[in-house]
Image (spheres, grey):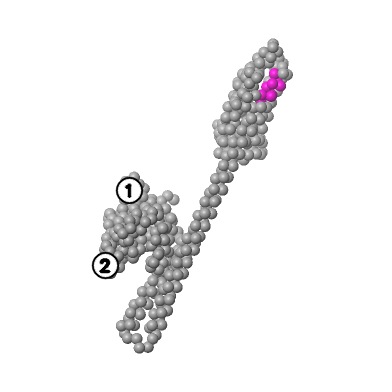
Amino acid sequence: MKNLQDIRGQLAALAEHVGARRAAILLSWQAAIKRDPKLTNGNSLPRGELVDHIPAILAAFEHSLTAPEGAAAESVEAAGHQPAAEHGLQRWKQGYDLREVARELGKLNECVVLELNQYAAANPNFSREALTRAQEVWATMCSTSIEESVSQYFALQREEAAGHIKELEQALDQIRELEQQRGEIWQQAAHDLRGNLSVVANVTVGLTRHGANDATREDFVRLLMRNVTSLHHLLNDVTSLARLQAGREKRQIEALDLTTIFEPLCEGVRHLATQRGLYLHSEGPAGFATDGDPVKIRRIAQNLILNAVKYTREGGVKVTWGDSRPDDPKRWLLTVKDTGPGFSTGTVMPLADARSSGSDAGEGIGLSIVKRLCEMLDATIEMESVPGTGTSIHVLFPRHYSG
């Protein structure tokens, strides 16, 4: 019993010594890491981030040296669990690989073992039994630390890999969806081109017939011109979409006044609305200044306004621009509202599907161009539509662009 009490007393003295020497042990450990050519990440870390949870591991060792004999093993493992797991988490965040985590803790083991041997050598009354016990306690502590640190690191690494796999799967699904949409768009374009070319061919045949009176010829010419114009617009849209999909379009951001873009645009389309018995109203603050790409903003607005005019049979179209919502001061708002048939949907892409059914040539392509132009300008599209009442399309643009 006396021998056991003596050992406990010697271990308590050792624990006090290790506590007093903790800063020196940490410096020795840090120097060992810097000397190791295979441990390079630690050189770029401030001392606080390098040392991080190591003092807690040493404190747990000091506490375990004075733990009761029967509860020593359980106490040692419990004491070292939390700081070791946190160490693994920290090293994972700092970009260590798994080998470096284990090697770094191995260097700590070397420093502590050296400290124990030097203490025993400097204190002749420190018994071999006490040294053996201290080494056993530290071996358990070190083993637990390495196991928990590496396990935590590995778990996080595995979680990160699972996240990457999920992101890749989502990306593949999006690619497949985009490819399907692209195929449908180009199929529609081919169908529209064939339809227009068939009309042009038939009209050309009609014009070559002998005996056709002047009125008939004029009708054929008007039909020919309308379809040639439609073909021209469709080919322009196909070319624009191809450039967008190929990444050949670049945004050119500059300071601009929206009034100088939208008022001439609405004035140019107003005659088309008047021919169809519709009104086209435009409203926006004079001199509304913002940043943006004027060419692409005009293309977005033109496509939406023309689409609204095409699908409205009674009433008309209203175009407004200006400040966004009160809780969204970093963006400005363009709205194109029509009194057309409307439809039941809440997203942009169904808009293309719903309106392209029985629509004029190139309708789906035009809406796809709008979507891609908005993506280039970091703009978002929102739609409100009520069957039999009309549709409002809202495009929110950033007021300013970084870089």
Residue at mark 1: 325
Left/right placement of residue 159 relative to residue 32 reads left
* Of residues 331 and 382, the one drawn nearer to the viewer in this rendering: 382
Image spot of residue 130 (x, y percent): 70, 18
Q: Is residue 150 above or below residue 176?
A: above
Q: Is residue 116 above or below residue 182?
A: above
Residue at mark 2: 277
The local secondary structure at tag 2 comes to: loop
The quadrant in which residue 302 appears is bottom left
Q: Is residue 137 magenta?
A: yes
Question: Is there CB contact under 8 Å for labels 2 and 1?
Answer: no
The quadrant in which residue 393 appears is bottom left
Disc 2 residue type (three-letter) = Gly
Residue reaching furthest to the bottom: 211
Q: CA distance from mark 2 to mark 1?
A: 33 Å
- Earlier-in-chain disc, 2 versus 1: 2
Task: Please name the residue shown 63% across and 39% down the image.
Answer: 98
Task: Please name the residue shown 38% across and 83% down the image.
Answer: 207
Image spot of residue 8 (x, y percent): 66, 16
Q: Nearer the viewer, mark 2 or mark 1?
A: 2
Image spot of residue 379 (x, y percent): 40, 53
Q: Is residue 9 above or below residue 114?
A: above
Task: Please name the residue shown 38% across and 54% down the image.
Answer: 346
Disc 1 residue type (three-letter) = Arg
Image spot of residue 83 (x, y percent): 58, 30
- Bounds of the magenta segment: 130-138
- Give the class, few, some or many, for how many residues have Cα within 10 Å of label 2's Cα (few <14, many ≥20): few
Q: Is residue 249 above or below residue 28?
A: below
Task: Please name the residue shown 42% across and 57% down the image.
Answer: 349
Q: Main secondary structure of the magenta part?
A: helix
Left/right placement of residue 217 relative to residue 47 reads left
The local secondary structure at tag 1 comes to: loop
